[in-house]
Amino acid sequence: MGRSRTGAGSRLLMMVLGLGLCALLLMGCQSLTGGRRDRLVLSLLGDPKTFNPVLVTDAGSGAVLSPIFEGLLSVDGVTGELIPNLAEQWKISDGGKRIEFILRPGLQWSDGVPLTADDVMFSFAVITHPRVPSSLRDVLRIGENRVFPTLTKLDQRRVVFQLPETFAPFLRAIGGMEVLPRHILGDALKNTNSKGEPQFLQAWSLQEPLANIIGTGPYLMRTYRPGERVIYDRNPNYWKKGQPFINGMVFQILENLDTWLLRFRSRELDVYSLRPEDFELLKIAERRDRFKIYNSGPTTTQLFLMYNLNQGRDPETNRPFVDPIKSRWFNSLPFRQAIAHAINRPRMVDTIFRGLGELQNSPIPPISPYYLAPEQGLKVYDYDLERAKKLLQEAGFRYDAQGRLRDADNNEVRFTVQTNAGNTVRAQVGSQIKESLEQIGITVDFNAIDFNVLIEKMDRSKQWEAIIMGFGSSVEPHSLINLWATDGNLHIFNQGAKLGEPAIPGYESAPWEQEIEALMIAGAREVDEAKRRQIYAQYQQKIQENLPLTYLVAQLSLTAVRDRLEGVRPSVLGGVLWNIDELKLAE
C-alpha cells in the first residue's frame, strides 16, 4: 500500500506476507461502494486488531494502516532503491556512523498541524521504549550488546542518528519507521496505567474515533464497520500535491477466497491475486474481460513447516508448553531432517501449485544479492523416503509390526500440524504433508483453525506442536532479525518471555540458535558487500543444517489487474499497488 516503505514498510509487508496473506490481501470491488467508479476497493481476510501502527502483529491491521502512515525514506517497488519520502535528503558521515535526515519543508499532518523534528524524536522514543513491544525495536538493536543508536534534534527540520558501530541495514530500517503525531500521542507515552505500563499500549484501539487517527500518508480513514469494510478519503494535506489521483478506496472485509474469485469473474473487482488453481480459468478470459495477468516471479514469502522447540513450562501452571515426549522428537535434529526428506515438495509444485512455484530452501529470496543457491552449496533435503527412514532408525526410532513409527520408549509417533483456516493453498499443503509422513509411519493430525486462535497459540499460550506458516522476507536479510534473534519478538519456534512477562521455567536456547543470531549481528556490522555475502551464506547454511523451519515452495506472484487501473508497475518486491499514490482509474 502506498509507496513501499523500508523498515516499517518491509516489517508490515513481512507480517502480511509472513502470515501468508500478501498474495491474497488486495482485491478490488466496485459494487460495494454504491456504484462509485472513483474508488478502488481492496479486500482483507479479517478485521484489524488495532489502529496503532507500532503495535501491529497481524496482516489486517498492517494493511489497513499502511495508506495512513509514512516513513522518512521509501523504497522503489521495482528497483528496490532507497528514495526520499518525508525526508528530502540524508547525509552520511563518520564512517557511516552518523546519519543526518533533513525533512521536507512545509510537511503537515492530516489535521493540518505542522510535522517537525519533534515528531521524529517522539516516534523513535516510542519504538525504543522498553515497555512498547515494537517489531522494529529488534531490527534497530545494534551489535552484541543490542543497543540503540542515539538521536539528536538539530532544528525543526533536521535530526541526527549516531550509531555505536557500523550497521549496514540502518537506512532501510529507520527510513521506514512510521512517523507518529506527538501532539496526539505524546501524553499516552508519558502517562502510565496501574501496572506501570504506558497508556500508549491502549492508544488508538479499534474504539478510537477515526478523526483522531492522524497520519501523513495519501489516505485517511473515514469509516470502519467491523466485519464489513474500511472506507478511506484522500488526505487533503498529503505532501505530494495533487496526489493521490484516486479519490478514495475501500478495504472490504471478506474471508472466503472463492467469493473473491467469483466477484472478479463477474467484473466487480479491479485486482485479484491468483491462487495456483485460478490461473488456467482466468487466463482464457484475460482479453475478453479486459484485464491482464502479471507474473512478477517467485514470491518473497517463506512457506514452511515449523516445530515448537520450546522446552519451557507455563509460569502460572508449571505445565510444559509441549508434551515432553513430543518435545524430544522435535528437538532431535535427525527427526527434523527425516521429515524434511519425507515431504514430497516436487509433488506440491506439480499438484497444489500447478507448476507455478519453485522449491524453497532459504530464508532469503532468490531476488536478493545475498541468496545462496543450492548450486553454490546450500544444503537441501531432496525427497528421499529411504533416507528419511534410515535417519529415524539411526536416531533410535523403530517400526512396529503395523509399520507405525515408535520412539525408543515405544511411544507411537503422532503429532498435530495446524494452519490458518481460509487459506486453501496451506490446507492442501497440510494434507500432502500428512500423506507424505504416512509413508514413513508417522501419523499427522492436520487441522486448520481460526487465524486469531492460531496467533494466540504462537504468540501467547505457546501451546502448539507444529504449524504451517509463512513470513515475508526481504532483499535485506536483517529484516528477519526479530525471527532469528533468540530474544526476538517473532522467535516463534522457541519463544522466550516477552516484555512484561515472567521468566519461563526450563526455557533455553540451543547453541545453533545463538550462532544464527551471531551471524545476523556480524552481517549487519559488515559494510563490505562481498564479506556480507559470505556471512549470510553461512547464516543460510546454519539454518538449513539445523532446520528450525522446513522450507517448502515459493509460489509465483500472479496478479490480475483490470485495464481501467492505470500506472501499475508490478514487481515481486512491491506487488501491484506499491505506488498507490500514483495510480489512476480510467474515466
Image: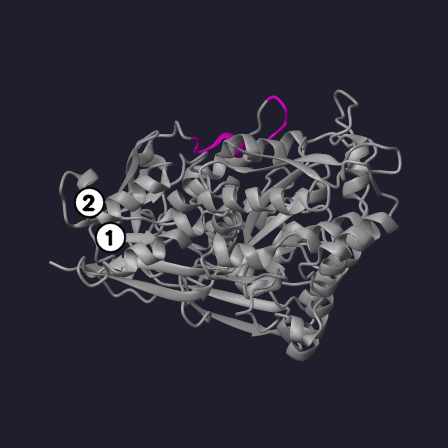
Q: What stretch of residues is rendered in magenta?
A: 194-205
Is 204 in the magenta? yes
* Residue at 77% from the left image edge and 52% from the top image edge: 513
Residue at the (46%, 61%) spot, across then down? 355
Q: Residue at x 30, y 32 (%)?
A: 228
As drawn, is 425 to the left or to the right of 409? left
Give coordinates of residue 274: x percent, y percent. 37, 54
Residue 140 among magenta residues: no
Q: Is residue 115 visible?
A: no
Q: Quadrant of the C terminus?
A: bottom left
- Determine which residue is flagged by label 2: 30
Where residue 127 sits: x, y (%)?
A: 57, 46
Residue 487 position (above or below residue 189): below
Q: Could you tell me residue 58's position as x and y percent?
A: 49, 40
Look at 27% across and 58% down and name the residue there.
561
At label 1, the amino acid type is Asp
Q: Type of residue at label 2?
A: Gln
Residue 504: x %, y % from top left: 78, 32
Q: Is residue 5 left or right of residue 525?
A: left
Asked if the residue under mark 1 is in contact with the one under mark 2, i.e. CB atoms within 8 Å, the reply is: yes
